[in-house]
Image (spheres, rainbow, N blue to C red):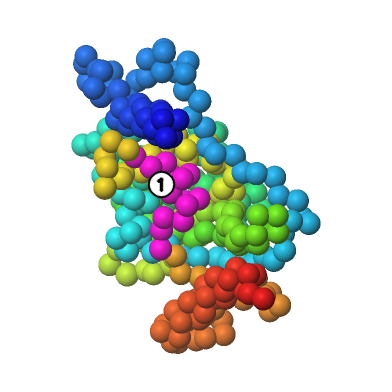
Amino acid sequence: MKFKCLVLCSLGLILASFHATAQLNILNAKTPDEIGVKTEAQIASDNDTPLPYGYIDNRDVLWSKTVWEIIDLDERVNFPLYYPIDTNNIGPERRSLYDVLVKNIKNGRITEIYSDSYFTTKRDLSDIQASLTYSDTTDLGIEQFNAEGTVDPEFVRRFTLDAGDIEEWRVRGFWYLDKRQGELKYRLLGICPVANEARSKAFQDDNIDSKVELFWVWFPAARQVLHEAKAFNRLNTSMPVSFDHLLNSRRFAGVIYREDNEYGDREVKDYITDNALMQLLESERIKELIRNTEIDLWNY
């Protein structure tokens, strides 16, 4: 009993120290500039890294299924992936998932970027910039170009997608039965922001509805970046949750819109058309099939 109490006390102290540092040194800061800056002692003792994935041999995978899901950002449970969209009045430590990905794509920390969920065609920063921005020349700029052959910068309108324009996220995941541990597990493979094209911001009166997948990120290669970025925890502000933990633990509401199948991985809407309710029920049927697979493993 004494040993058990000692272990519990030790864990409590560890968690308490973690909570104290979760506010990014706000209690130890002498000036506002020191908020978010770790001391040398904290840096030396910090071994905060993403929980590594264990090695899974192909022989240990008894059953598997790949699914694609839509994370609708209008649902309240998914708000930590969407907000904040206005960063003028908050600190630099709080950013939306979109801002985190785009920032680290631009600074080169995230390089595994692809055009589709099968990760066949790799993209670079110039491709990303082309899909996130739109330039338009005004009528006065066109007149100047016809007369002089050049256009002044004030006659060029530029529109850039930001976090507020993201309408949903799409993720590709891999469900599998681990034969050694006898349990169903999930591994996130890729994540993609979806928004209307930047051109729609230039012509808002046209009500252009052209949702496109902006880019796909190979999730395992971005885990360190997503681990360092924190999402807001509405239940306990002193203990923010990393985006890596939030996504790996599936703390979001997703609707399956595609599964791997013999029809070329066709989407649910391809064989259930013009009926949103039946599409939703089909998504739930696929989820139930995955859950029942683990239950059936222990039925004799």
| Left or right of residue 123, residue 10 in this image | left
* Residue 167 in view: no
Residue 299: give x, y in percent of width and height: 63, 74
Q: Quadrant of residue 38?
A: top left
Q: Quadrant of residue 40?
A: top left
Residue 260: give x, y in percent of width and height: 65, 71
Q: Which residue matches tag 1?
A: 97
Which residues are drawn in magenta?
A: 240-253
Secondary element under disc 1, as helix, strand or loop, is: helix
Say few, some or many: other residues with alpha carbon within 10 Å of mark 1 (under 14 / 14 to 19 / 20 or more). Answer: many
* Residue ranking furthest to the front: 1
Quick check: 272 above or below 35?
A: below
Q: Residue at x 63, y 70 (%)?
A: 298
Q: Amino acid at mark 1?
A: Leu
Quick check: 281 above or below 128?
A: below
Task: Verify whether residue 241 appears in magenta.
Answer: yes
For the N terminus, which image quadrant? top left
Task: Verify whether residue 172 appears in magenta.
Answer: no
Q: Nearer the viewer, residue 201 or 75?
A: 75
